[in-house]
Amino acid sequence: MSYREGSSDWNTPAYVWDTIIPFIPREKKIWMPFYNDGYSGNYLREWSFDIIHKNEDFWNHNRGDCIVDNPPYNCKGIVKTKEKIMKRLIELDKPFMLLMLFVHFILYGFATRWNLKKITILFRC
């Protein structure tokens, strides 16, 4: 697990990516818009995924065929930030896979609020 010096940001550990790799489409160009320090994109490239992972503003870009990433957790107003991220993903109208706390997904009604037609939830125990 990699920790960003001087912040409270932690990268998604390899074992979490290893758990979801079978569900990530290999035939798609994958945009990972939440950069942190680039670890996640580099890790998935090692698995031969076609990854776009740049240190750029998520709100001003639209890349790849689908989005796979772990959005930020340690920021002010995290629920509103997650809600804005969900709205933006739906506006982009492409498949996405997010790693997020189940409590955010259920308690804040992310699935029903935007009438998501197809959703799969994976749990790691």
Image: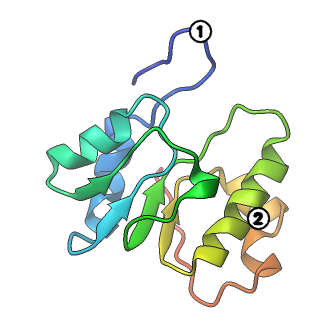
Tell me, yes or no, whether the two marked residues, 2 and 1, touch with CB atoms within 8 Å.
no
Q: Which quarter of the figure has residue 2?
A: top left
- Secondary structure category for the residue under label 2: helix
Q: In percent of the image, x 34 and y 47: which residue is there? A: 17
Q: Residue furthest toward the top?
A: 6
Q: Which mark is residue 107?
A: none
Q: Is residue 27 left or right of residue 71?
A: left
How is colour applied across the structure in the image? rainbow
Q: Is residue 109 left or right of residue 52?
A: right
Q: Which quarter of the figure has residue 105?
A: bottom right
Q: How many marks?
A: 2
Q: On the rendered image, what quadrant is the N terminus found in?
A: top left
Mark 2 Cα-neighbour bin, 10 Å: few <14, some 14–19, many ≥20? few
Q: In percent of the image, x 46 and y 38: which residue is there? A: 55
Closer-to-camera residue (105/4): 4
| Residue 123: percent from left, percent from top | 50, 59
Q: Amino acid at mark 2?
A: Ile
**Tag 2 residue:** 106
- Secondary structure category for the residue under label 1: loop
Q: Amino acid at mark 1?
A: Gly
Q: Which quarter of the figure has residue 6?
A: top right
Q: Which mark is residue 6?
A: 1
Closer-to-camera residue (27/13): 27
| Residue 3: percent from left, percent from top | 47, 18
Mark 1 Cα-neighbour bin, 10 Å: few <14, some 14–19, many ≥20? few
Q: Residue furthest toward the bottom?
A: 117
Q: Is residue 27 above or below residue 24?
A: below
Q: In percent of the image, x 64 and y 55: which residue is there? A: 59
Between marks 2 and 1, how big is the CA–CA gap? Answer: 31 Å
